[in-house]
């Protein structure tokens, strides 16, 4: 079997597996449980996260985001938006790419809307593209990263953490976040 055909087939299988998560959509109760567990883990990693989250106008949590591929890549995850500690909506994150993608990884994402204006812009959009629609500050080092007062004043902060697997690219660019209508 030709190596290119084998790589292409493997890549398509990985992308199909990663993006097929949409067909196995979680229930709201499952998402709520995963969100709570993820936030607890996030606060355990760095106790300062709790105070930062308390200051946020809203916190969008994606407990499980699967990203992978070989050449052609895909990403999918489901989560919830919380305001004042209560879930106000369910969302999905998805992306597709063509290029230098190789591998499969799972991670968690937390996006904090630090101002009411940034939260309003997010909630009033119909499909929010990270990179195009948002001035997100990705905290380097993920949940283990440190942030200073200047970083905390940014309107949107993002954390990527709990990486499992091996993938050369764990950025947020190109991801689209959409509300899940149930």
Image (tube, rainbow, N blue to C red):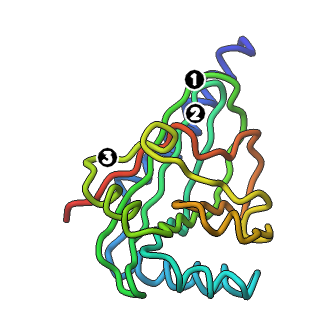
* Mark carried by residue 73: 2
Q: Is residue 177 left or right of residue 36?
A: left
Q: CA distance from mark 3 to mark 2?
A: 20 Å
**Identity of the residue drawn at 49% across and 78% down:** 35
* Mark carried by residue 111: none
Report x, y in % for residue 61: 49, 69
Q: Is 79 located above or below residue 3 in the figure?
A: below
From the image, tell me which residue sits under label 3.
127
Q: In front of the other: label 1 or label 3?
A: 3
Q: CA distance from mark 1 to mark 2?
A: 6 Å
From the image, tell me which residue sits under label 1.
98
Report x, y in % for residue 47: 73, 88
**Identity of the residue drawn at 72% across and 70% down:** 143
**Identity of the residue drawn at 52% across and 45% down:** 75
Report x, y in % for residue 124: 25, 56
* Of callouts 1 and 3, the N-terminal one: 1
């Amino acid at each position: 079997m030709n190596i290119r055909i084998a790589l292409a087939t493997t890549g398509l299988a990985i992308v199909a597996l990663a993006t097929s998560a949409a067909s196995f959509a979680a229930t709201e109760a499952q998402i709520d449980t995963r969100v709570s567990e993820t936030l607890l883990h996030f606060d355990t990693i760095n106790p300062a996260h709790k105070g930062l989250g308390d200051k946020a106008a809203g916190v969008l949590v994606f407990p499980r985001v699967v990203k992978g591929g070989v050449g052609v890549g895909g990403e999918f995850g489901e989560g919830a938006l919380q305001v004042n500690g209560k879930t106000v909506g369910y969302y999905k994150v998805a992306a597709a790419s063509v290029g230098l993608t190789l591998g499969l990884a799972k991670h968690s994402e937390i996006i904090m809307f630090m101002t009411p204006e940034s939260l309003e812009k997010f909630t009033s959009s119909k499909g929010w593209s990270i990179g195009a629609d948002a001035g997100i500050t990705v905290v380097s080092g993920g949940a283990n990263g440190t942030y200073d007062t200047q970083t905390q004043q940014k309107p949107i902060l993002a954390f990527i953490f709990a990486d499992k697997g091996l993938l050369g690219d764990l950025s947020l660019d190109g991801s689209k976040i959409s509300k899940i209508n149930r």
